[in-house]
Image (cartoon, grey):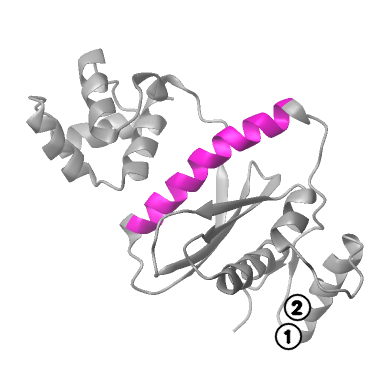
Amino acid sequence: MINERIKQARLLSGRTQSEVVAKLGEYGIKLTKAGLSKYERGGSVPSPRILLKLANVLSVKTNYFLEDPTIKIQWLAYRKHVSLGKKKQEQIQAFATEVLNGQLWLQEKLYPNDIPSFPKREKVKTFNAAENAAAKLRTHWKLGDTPIESLTGIIEDRGGVVITYPYDNKNFQGLSGWANKKYPVAIVCGQAPADRCRLSLAHELGHLMMDNNEVN
């Protein structure tokens, strides 16, 4: 849908609706914030002239708006500093969504019958329950008690998706979710030290495998 792609491109650019409207004004396009919001909600469709200028402002090709999004993501949890604002969070989610659109399209074309080998997510309320869930995951993946050389490799080999956010942001460490209710996804900050990235990835794997919402 065009409306979803307009919003996705805006979030990916890191711009607010007001900033986009102001930039369009520099191109001679008179559009209000309410008008842009209406486009993003699907209340109306912009003219080809406005779409062309939106493409310029948001640094995408015009056919970007005509591509149907292939995934829906249920985000679970952020590993972040409290100062990571909503605008930056939305930009990180948009970046991950864009990467996933391409990656999962290829995955389903090349391996249409593959199913991620992840056990069912279970509720945990205590430390012991979390330890048991971790042990069950090791058993499910036949890892034994030996150290894991590459956590990224293990997750990807089992059908999960690991995305590295390439931009420097000290307030962001990790994010996890489920794409199309099927593919587990973990995003980590690629600018962090290797040991910090590994810790964040393990943390996100924990969110994917354990529901601790009922922990007081």
Horizontal arrangement in the rendering, residue 154 relative to residue 213 (left or right): right
Percent coordinates x, y for residue 176 in the rendering: 58, 58
Percent coordinates x, y for residue 78 in the rendering: 50, 65
Evaluate if marks 2 and 1 touch, with contact meaning CB atoms under 8 Å apart. yes
Mark 2 crowd level (few <14, some 14–19, many ≥20, 10 Å Cα): some
* Residue at 19% in and 32% down: 35
* Residue at 39% in and 61% down: 168
Which amino acid lies under the numbered mark 2 shown in the image of this protein?
Ala
Q: What stretch of residues is rendered in magenta?
A: 88-109
Q: Is residue 71 visible?
A: no
Which amino acid lies under the numbered mark 1 shown in the image of this protein?
Phe
Q: Would you place residue 123 above or below residue 6 in this image?
A: below
Residue 92 is a magenta residue:
yes
Look at mark 1 in the image and give the residue it sits on.
Answer: 127
Residue 208 is labelled as: none
Q: Quadrant of residue 52?
A: top left
Is most of the magenta stretch helix, strand or loop? helix
Percent coordinates x, y for residue 34 in the rendering: 18, 37
* Residue at 49% in and 39% down: 98
Q: For the image shown, how many numbered marks are present on the structure?
A: 2
Q: Quadrant of the N terminus?
A: top left
Look at mark 2 in the image and give the residue it sits on.
Answer: 130
Percent coordinates x, y for residue 133 in the rendering: 80, 72
Viewer-side residue, 180 vs 116? 116
Q: Is residue 180 visible?
A: yes
Residue 189 is a magenta residue:
no
Q: Would you place residue 32 above or below residue 172 in this image?
A: above
Q: Quadrant of residue 76?
A: bottom right
Label 2 to label 1: alpha-carbon separation: 5 Å
Q: Quadrant of the C terminus?
A: bottom right
